Amino acid sequence: MPDTLTVTDNRTGKTYTLALHDGNIRAIDLRQIQTNPDDFGVMSYDPAYTNTAACRSSITYIDGDKGILRYRGYPIEQLAEKCTFPEVAYLILNGELPTPDQAQDWNEHLMRRTMLHENVKKFMEGFHYDAHPMGMFISTMAALSTFYNEAKKVLDPEVRKLEVLRAISKVPTIAAYTYRHSMGLPYVYPDNSLTYTENFMNMLWKMTEPVYKPNPAIARALDILFILHADHEQNCSTSAMRGVGSSQADPFVATAAAAAALYGPLHGGANEQVLRMLDEIGSKDKVPAYVAAVKNNKGKLMGFGHRIYKNYDPRARILKWAAERVFEVTGRNPKLDIALELERIALEDDYFVQRKLYPNVDFYSGIIYQALGFRPEMFTVLFAIPRTVGWLAQWEEMITDPEQKIARPRQVYTGKALRDVPARP
């Protein structure tokens, strides 16, 4: 029988036919497999959801074995080469690349909403001088929910469209304010005559000059970084966005929840760990000794390997090229030579090849961010700016999917059986 799976329960000898949908079974169909009428039925047990699809999505396609990443069918390599970040954001949200007129209209809508309410600025001023920028980012995103009460009408498509615009427009402003706060510098207001990334640079780095003139090479590098980080399928933070959004929470608090997941060192903080590793190695000539130590379980190779990719992360190839362009402006970061030597040795060593430990996006992004003058605590905030686009696209897809309900995973109970509280004197 085509498109079905036959399962035999060896406990009872019964056989069940399960329908396959896009090559997968629906977990709820396992519930019919019972030993008796009172049996709850079989569930799938999958810690960390390593083999469970929680949704159907048309946004991002990844083939980890082949090193493929596509947004809405377009290869990431072509998007990074030919498109701007706002164009890619439009694609991710709307399903198609914008026409020239649509791109101009989209940019105008984005730039028109870059300003933050003055009370939001005062809210951010209340953080301690050494507050972590990511903590400020998360808190401020959640606070926007109180400034745009209509955002709670998540079933209204026009409201959703407006709030998505607001969020994507304001995240660079929030991020830049967290940076200026951490540096003890006055805030810089948006300049809507600039592009999305140029305006972000203006809010980051403008000092006393009357008009900030962004370096085009740096602006393009940031554009590429933003494109590469815009979405990455059902990762930890995206799952958090969908999970919180499934309760029909508004997009600002859902985005704050997703950013909180990104804040964790196992998710958004990996590029900082790469820099620490390169600092530990110290110089190019010490790379072979470090690699030998890793092979003897006396160290970790950070920035290599990925939960999904079992091949060279396509984003890492692009960032390797972008790093060279950035260093033409900033001066060469000596860490790049260490990284290149580490990559060369690891890609030729059977120990790493057999384990499919290839460079991932974190391997080069931290080096670029550091060359631009960012401290490691800002890295995850920079990650969150473009990923907000992916989060909101996934949220919109979830809200409009008739199959989706409030998230409520099952558990396998392993606690005590029924027992009575002992009598007390």
Image: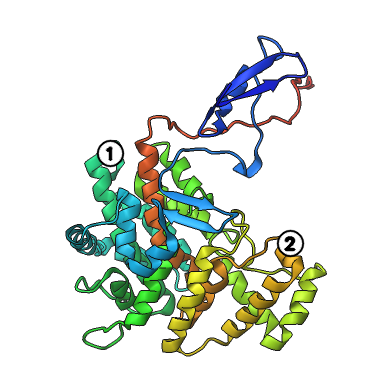
Residue occupying the point 44% across, 55% down: 70
Identified by mark 1, the residue type is: Lys
Q: How many marks?
A: 2
**Can I make out residue 124 in this image?**
yes
Q: Quadrant of the N terminus?
A: top right
Mark closer to the chain start, 2 or 1: 1
Quadrant location of residue 281?
bottom right
Secondary structure state at the residue bearing disc 1:
loop
Residue 288 picture location, percent across and down: 75, 81
Label 1 sits on residue: 153
Instruction: Tell whether 88 sits left or right of 341.
Output: left
Characterize the local packing of mark 2: few (<14), some (14-19) or many (20 or more) Cα atoms within 10 angstroms.
Answer: few
Q: Residue furthest bottom?
A: 331
Residue occupying the point 28% across, 76% down: 188
Label 2 sits on residue: 354
Residue 242 picture location, percent across and down: 45, 43
Q: Is residue 377 above or below residue 43?
A: below
